Image (cartoon, helix red, strand yellow):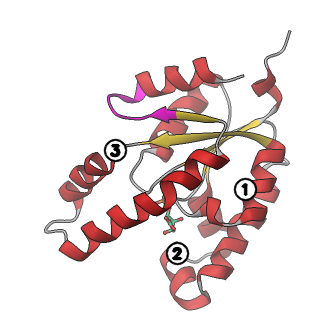
Amino acid sequence: YLREHMHQHIFLIGMPGAGKTTVGKALSKELNRDFYDLDLTIQEKTGKSIQNIIIYDGEEKFRQHEYDAIRELIRNKPSVIATGGGTVLSEKTVQIMRNNGIIVFVNRDVTQILDDLDLEIRPLLKESIEYIFRLYEERYPLYESVSHIKIGNESNISDTVQAIIEALP
Ligand code: S3P
């Protein structure tokens, strides 16, 4: 018999820095699927950076780009798609994902996210630490409620990938 996920896309959701792209790439290799990163797809399609789209066109326009990109990507054969941290903020985008695939919440402790960020952006402003904590608190219940599966990405990538594969329907 075919497992349910075989004909569905797998969408990875979660906070910036949770590891959606890294986990998604490894998962796609393991499942022998194509991998798409939603931010990259939008940048390639528009020829603009995500930052510029958000600053000059506005967040609402960006959320529409996310919806449009997903609508196009789901026409491909079942793939693994890493979304952006805010993709789930749009209800219609959540709907199109739920109608066409399995949503996996890649969770990573906020202190771990901050530790990793610290290596890249140093010194991190106090404001941005507070901002990330607030974002995490605001979004956590949303990530939980829209996802089919929740997996902690706390130790190493291959453990996370195996945990996702085992949890797939
Ligand atoms: C965003 C997260 C980013 C990107 C955009 C907005 C957000 O993606 O889509 O900057 O609202 O959390 P990552 O989660 O891949 O960083």
Mark 3 highlights which residue? 109
Q: Is mark 1 on a helix, strand or loop?
A: helix
Q: Tell me, yes or no, whether the two marked residues, 2 and 1, touch with CB atoms within 8 Å.
A: no
Q: Which amino acid does label 2 sit on?
A: Ser
Q: Which residues are the magenta region?
A: 151-158
Mark 2 or mark 3, which is nearer to you? 3
Residue 11: percent from the left, percent from the top?
65, 44
The image's mark for residue 94 is 1
The earlier-in-sequence mark between 2 and 1 is 2
Q: Mark 2 points at which residue?
A: 49
Tell me if 116 is positioned left or right of 64 in this view. Answer: left
Distance between the alpha carbons at the discs numbered 2 and 1 = 23 Å
Q: Return the disc, 1 or 3, that comes first in the chain's sequence.
A: 1
Who's the residue at 48% across and 77% down the image?
51
Mark 3, other Cα within 10 Å: few <14 / some 14–19 / many ≥20: some
Q: How crowded is mark 1: few (under 14 residues within 10 Å), some or many (20 or more)?
A: some
Looking at the picture, which amino acid does disc 1 mark? Val
- Residue at 15% across / 66% down in the picture? 122
Magenta segment includes 21: no
